[in-house]
Image (cartoon, helix red, strand yellow):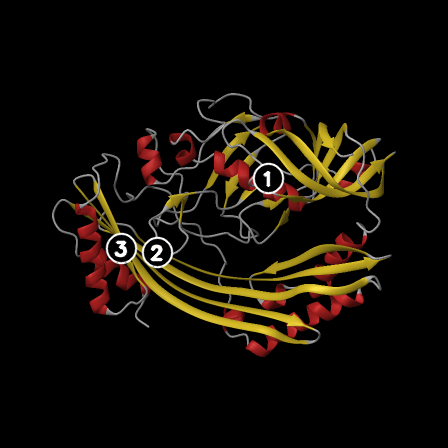
């Protein structure tokens, strides 16, 4: 196949006087294997490639894409993008990215071991994951799913303004959902193992996590309503950070959809919280070397010792906000123009084990799962209410399981009421890392 960067540079080079062109070229291969009762329930292997072309002229922007890299299709896609620009509204802030002085990080994100891994080996991992999950505990009565998933991703971005960048990444993970049964009751639990290549994966780790999460909820009841200390486990924290990260984008601020608008430099969290978006960390599953506009990925502080210190920007939101891109352009693929979003959010960890933090809580609730979190948060007011399940904490020890409860607060209050942070940073197959958070005085609504 012709080099992706060559294709992108060729299209960008077709720019006319007074016109800007951005070409985004992708080649991606994905595999998904699901095991059931020791056999392959489904196996999907897909390969896709394509190009997205953005044209900006006289403040008007047009976009078009094609799911092929055929030379004729490249020219046709550019023509279509130009036509679309002609029907667009003028916006003085439209424009492709301009080169900046940030060096592209040299990250080890691409593993030939995954590229050359036989499909049979991937199947074997999925089957072993299911077997290991069933064998962890006699109360595991079934497996909702046991999957191996991977992606091999290559992309190139070139612009008529002088950007020419590439990134190559591999990633894979195991995911299992276990069903635990006892006395006619059924509970579920999940577990993950992530890596850059199959040898990084550990089916036993994923299996044990899934079994523990499922079995420890057996016998759960609905408690009374009260205010108490809540401990968010890493999985819950990662989901919460994903929502916070969205409200910290320049796009959300410009559209009036952020509770952090007009608060730069203010104290928005307890001083223990430092939140950074840093996809230069190779441990992050979503680490990358360049963003969706071809600019170098960089570390962007968002909250520093409790103080709001920055927002995430792509070129458009940066220009419109009177600042610059933070290398935070995000794309869902070649079929759409770049937006803006977090790449790899993480809270600076504390220095204590979660078990030590729990040992200091007389009356609390360890939240290991939430339901409807995204729909239950108002990004403008910060109000949130979500269903939750987990374990009571009594006299410093994990106690009876509870379910069918709702925890409610505001994001502002939650960030201010964090009283401790664990040392257990955990990267998951999403754009945020998890860590144990201890939050004081949260309402738990039950019976």
Q: Measure how far apart labels 3 and 1 are at the Cα level.
A: 34 Å
Numbered badge on residue 240:
1
Numbered badge on residue 401:
none
Q: Position of residue 113 (x, y in %)?
A: 54, 70
Q: Nearer the viewer, residue 2 or 388?
A: 388
Q: Position of residue 410 (x, y in %)?
A: 60, 28
Badge 1 density bin: few <14, some 14–19, many ≥20, Cα 10 Å: some
State left or right for residue 239 relative to residue 223. left
Task: Residue 247: tell me if it is visible.
Answer: yes
- Are the residues at dot 3 and dot 1 in contact (C-beta closer than 8 Å)? no
Of mark 3 and mark 1, the one earlier in the sequence is 3
Of mark 2 and mark 3, the one earlier in the sequence is 3
Q: Which residue is mark 3?
A: 64
Numbered badge on residue 335:
2
- Are the residues at dot 2 and dot 1 in contact (C-beta closer than 8 Å)? no
- Are the residues at dot 2 and dot 3 in contact (C-beta closer than 8 Å)? no
Rendered image quadrant of residue 154: bottom left
Badge 3 density bin: few <14, some 14–19, many ≥20, Cα 10 Å: many
Farthest residue in the left direction? 17
On screen, residue 25 above or below 278: below
């Amino acid at each position: 196949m012709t080099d992706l960067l060559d294709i992108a540079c060729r299209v960008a080079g077709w720019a006319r006087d007074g016109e800007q062109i951005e070409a985004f070229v992708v080649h991606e291969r994905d595999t998904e294997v699901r095991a059931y009762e020791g056999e392959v329930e489904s196996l999907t292997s897909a390969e896709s490639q394509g190009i997205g072309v953005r044209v900006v002229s006289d403040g008007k922007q047009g976009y078009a894409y094609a799911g092929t890299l055929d030379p004729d299709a490249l020219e046709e896609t550019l023509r279509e993008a130009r036509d679309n620009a002609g029907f667009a509204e003028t916006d003085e802030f439209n424009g492709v990215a301009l080169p900046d002085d940030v060096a592209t990080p040299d990250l080890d994100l691409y593993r030939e071991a995954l590229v050359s891994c036989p499909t049979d080996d991937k199947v074997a991992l999925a089957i072993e994951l299911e077997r290991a999950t069933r064998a962890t505990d006699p109360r595991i009565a079934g497996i909702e799913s046991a999957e191996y998933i991977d992606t091999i991703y290559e992309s190139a971005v070139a612009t008529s303004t002088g950007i020419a960048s590439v990134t190559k990444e591999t990633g894979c993970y195991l995911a299992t959902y276990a069903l635990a049964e006892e006395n006619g009751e059924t509970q579920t639990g999940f577990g993950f193992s992530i890596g850059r290549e199959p040898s990084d994966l550990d089916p036993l780790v994923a299996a044990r996590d899934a079994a523990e999460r499922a079995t420890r909820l057996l016998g759960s009841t609905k408690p009374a309503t009260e205010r108490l200390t809540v401990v968010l486990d890493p999985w819950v924290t990662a989901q919460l950070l994903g929502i916070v990260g969205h409200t910290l984008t320049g796009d959300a601020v410009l559209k009036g959809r952020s509770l952090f608008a007009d608060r730069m430099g203010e104290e928005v969290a307890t001083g223990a919280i430092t939140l950074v978006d840093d996809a230069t960390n190779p441990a992050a599953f979503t680490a990358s070397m360049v963003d969706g506009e071809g600019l170098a990925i960089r570390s962007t502080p968002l909250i520093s010792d409790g103080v709001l210190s920055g927002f995430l920007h792509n070129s458009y939101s940066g220009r419109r906000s009177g600042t610059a891109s933070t290398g935070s352009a995000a794309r869902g693929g070649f079929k759409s123009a770049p937006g803006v979003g977090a790449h790899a959010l993480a809270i600076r960890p504390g220095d204590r084990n979660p078990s030590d933090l729990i040992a200091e809580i007389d009356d609390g609730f360890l939240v290991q799962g939430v339901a409807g979190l995204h729909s239950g948060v108002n990004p403008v007011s910060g109000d949130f209410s979500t269903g939750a399940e987990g374990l009571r904490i009594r006299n410093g020890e994990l106690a009876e399981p509870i379910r069918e409860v709702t925890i409610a607060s505001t994001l502002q209050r939650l960030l201010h009421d964090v009283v401790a942070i664990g040392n257990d940073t955990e990267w998951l197959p999403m754009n945020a890392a998890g860590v144990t958070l201890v939050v004081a005085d949260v309402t738990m609504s039950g019976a």
